[in-house]
Amino acid sequence: MFSGCATAIITPMLKDGAVDEEGLRELVRFQEESGIRVLVPCGSTGESATLDHDEHLKVIGIVIDEAKRSKIVAGTGSNSTKEAIHLTKGAKDLGADGALSVTPYYNRPTQAGIVKHFQAIDAAVDIPTIVYNIPSRTGSNITAATMLQLAELPSIVGVKEASGDINQIATIVSKAPKDFCVLSGDDAMTLPAMAMGGKGVISVASNIVPGTMLALVKAMLDGDIKEARRINDGLLPLLSVLFIETNPIPVKTAVRLMGKPAGPFRLPLCEMSPEHLNALKAVLSDKKLI
């Protein structure tokens, strides 16, 4: 159902820390004008962990209202199953096309607990859902066996895989139902994940280089590995510097340096160190983005 290049869009904020509604609308327009057709608000890149529930649903609603050509896959995950159901119901009521639901974080549930969590969401809300597996943030990995079990649930249509384990990705791709969509959750893993049969990426980098990320994904979907490698090689310095500090600090800083709405971070995220900021500026300048 969802394939290609989706943008995990940042949440711009005003100087007082409030959500910048007009800035967010501008970013949505920029993405659509650049060819992006799937937007993912309120993911890790959108600082969802610092948004209260009203703000969370407000951001989703703004993106849905402003988008004219894109599907909206709203981040609705939580470490509380009850809260995840609440946010997922809210996103559906607002008109989201799908939900992105992260593995419960901090709790570190067992594989059985992970299955029960997603079974509860599936039973409560009828909306296409992409499971988000990112062990580095959640503290627990969804194994391939567990993911294949989740793929049998009616609402689970795909996985955003950010485990970094290519063997796990390959196993899921090879054994999941044919209509199950495996997406890379890491820009740098887009090419290898798609080479294994993945259908695209939910991208951080496409906040600033949507056209380039679209071209990379298109080349892979077209089977043009040579062109995909050329694009990927050119992206490597940018992809490296965008994760020199915790996401979304570098990418939100890059958006700001490009003159687009971004604004400050919410604590505990903070401004980049001078050393890393200089490294980011150097790459952005080299790529003629600033």
Image (cartoon, rainbow, N blue to C red):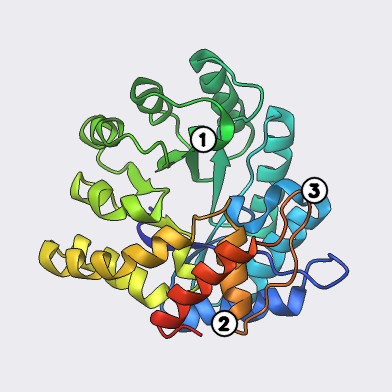
Image: 163 above or below 202? above
Q: CA distance from mark 1 to mark 3?
A: 24 Å
CA neighbours of label 1 inside 10 A, class few (<14), some (14 to 19), many (20+): few
Task: Answer left or right for 60 relative to 280.
Answer: right
Q: Earlier in the sequence, mark 2 or mark 1?
A: 1
Q: Residue 254's quadrant in the figure?
A: bottom right
Image: 194 above or below 34? above
Report if residue 256 is visible in the image: yes
Amino acid type, residue under disc 3 in the picture: His
CA neighbours of label 3 inside 10 A, class few (<14), some (14 to 19), many (20+): some
75 vs 96, nearest the viewer: 75
Amino acid type, residue under disc 2 in the picture: Met
Image: 167 above or below 289? above
Describe the element under mark 3 as helix, strand or loop: helix
Q: Earlier in the sequence, mark 1 or mark 3?
A: 3
Tag shown at residue 53: 3
Residue 195: percent from left, percent from top: 19, 50
Q: At x 74% / y 80%, what residue is drawn?
A: 22
Task: Answer left or right for 150 relative to 119.
Answer: left
The residue that mark 2 highlights is: 258
Q: Are marks 1 and 3 in contact (CB under 8 Å)?
A: no
Tag shown at residue 52: none
Report if residue 41 is visible in the image: no
CA neighbours of label 2 inside 10 A, class few (<14), some (14 to 19), many (20+): some
Q: Earlier in the sequence, mark 2 or mark 3?
A: 3
The residue that mark 1 highlights is: 136
Describe the element under mark 1 as helix, strand or loop: helix
